[in-house]
Image: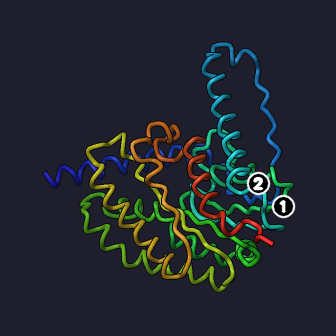
């Protein structure tokens, strides 16, 4: 029975790998972006014949959803922050595809893009640099922190946001898929913890005054593979626990997201069944905004 569960885990991850490979090839010309200023969103022009068979009700529903998300964040910014944002606030986002915004069908940069558009309501006093890169693992991010552009951004940042770790789990799966067992994941955890510590130490060396927020990851297979819920949930929780512990040991912050997606992945994931859609990223952005509130608000006079 245990073997059967292991095989199911292998199958689910392999499915994710195949889907991810297809997406990578389909978007091979897409590069990680650096966002230094608000991006103007220009409506795309399409031939009317291409939209002849579209369901007007569905299009209207999508428009309403985007509008609802935008309105919700404007209210959040006003009600939660009171629009009192520190002058010249600088946020640097680093990490994997969740920072890059893969899965956001609006192509506006996922949760980082949502934060960017939200802060545009504050007279452009916030600068956000986005260094998310699809597929990044902890070892790769650690090397990228030596990039002069990235390190310079961190040196000047008030807040550093990180998404990392999901691809480390994926690597264990790919490296041992012919004979995969839970022990393969647990055996990789000490080295994973060491790399997480190195990432936090490197950021601290670059900017000891920055507030660093590690954003946890969720179980994307919860709804599509309910029989794997416990096994995958255990693995994901243990990796998240390592990240949270390392953040706390460095007097930094951990932002949980797994609870946002629990029993909601069918509604919050994109068509690849792995990355968040616009609504999912919206929930992450809201959680992040609430978490960084104490840092980005102006001090009361």
- Residue contact between numbered discs 1 and 2, judged by CB atoms under 8 Å: yes
At horizontal 83% and vertical 44% (from top left) the residue drawn is 40
Q: Quadrant of the C terminus?
A: bottom right
Q: Give me the residue at 35% from left, 73% from top.
A: 188
Q: Is residue 144 left or right of residue 82?
A: left
Tell me if 289 is positioned left or right of 164 in this view: right
Quarter of the rendering containing residue 233: bottom left
What is the secondary structure assignment of the residue under circle 1? loop
Crowding near pointer 1: few (<14 within 10 Å), some, many (20+)?
A: some
Task: Report x, y in % for residue 185.
Answer: 32, 67
Residue closest to the far left? 1
For the residue pair 148 and 81, the one nearer the viewer reads as 81
Residue that label 2 marks: 119
Label 2 Cα neighbours within 10 Å, binned few <14 / some 14-19 / many ≥20: many
The percent coordinates of residue 259 (x first, y second) are: 44, 52
Q: Which residue is mark 1?
A: 125
Q: CA distance from mark 1 to mark 2?
A: 8 Å
Tell me the quarter of the picture where residue 231 sits.
bottom left
Q: How many discs mark residues in the rendered view?
A: 2
Q: Residue at x 77, y 32 (%)?
A: 44
- Colour scheme: rainbow
Picture disc at residue 64: none
Give the farthest residue toward the front.
Answer: 301
The percent coordinates of residue 150 (x first, y second) are 71, 72
Horizontal and vertical percent position of residue 87? 83, 67
The answer to whether residue 125 is above or below residue 63 is: below
Q: Secondary structure at mark 2?
A: helix
Q: Residue at x 48, y 82 (%)?
A: 249
- The first of marks 1 and 2 along the sequence is 2
- Residue 204 appears in which quarter of the rendering? bottom right
């Amino acid at each position: 029975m245990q073997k059967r569960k292991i095989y199911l885990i292998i199958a689910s991850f392999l499915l994710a790998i195949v889907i991810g490979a297809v997406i990578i090839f389909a978007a091979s010309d897409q590069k990680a972006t650096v966002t230094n200023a608000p991006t103007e969103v220009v409506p795309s022009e399409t031939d009317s014949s291409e939209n002849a068979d579209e369901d007007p009700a569905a299009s209207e529903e999508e428009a309403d959803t985007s509008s609802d998300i935008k309105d919700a964040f404007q209210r959040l910014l006003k009600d939660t922050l009171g629009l009192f944002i520190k002058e010249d606030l600088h946020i640097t986002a680093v990490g994997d595809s969740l920072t890059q915004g893969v899965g956001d069908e609006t192509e506006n940069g996922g949760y980082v893009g949502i934060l960017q558009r939200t802060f545009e309501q504050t007279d452009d006093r916030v600068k956000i640099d986005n260094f998310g890169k699809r597929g990044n693992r902890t070892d790769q991010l650690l090397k990228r922190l030596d990039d002069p552009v990235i390190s310079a951004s961190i040196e000047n940042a008030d807040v550093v946001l990180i998404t990392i770790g999901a691809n480390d789990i994926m690597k264990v799966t790919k490296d041992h898929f012919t004979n995969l067992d839970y022990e393969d994941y647990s055996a990789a955890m000490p080295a994973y913890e060491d790399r997480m510590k190195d990432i936090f130490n490197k950021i601290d060396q670059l900017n000891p005054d920055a507030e660093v927020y590690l954003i946890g990851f969720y179980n994307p297979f919860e709804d599509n593979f309910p029989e794997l819920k416990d096994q995958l949930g255990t693995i994901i929780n243990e990796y998240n626990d390592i990240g949270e512990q390392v953040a706390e040991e460095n007097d930094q912050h951990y932002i949980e997201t797994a609870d946002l997606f629990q029993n909601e992945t069918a509604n919050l994931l994109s068509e690849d069944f792995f990355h968040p859609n616009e609504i999912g990223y919206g929930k992450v952005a809201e959680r992040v905004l609430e978490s960084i509130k104490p840092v980005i608000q102006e001090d009361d006079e």
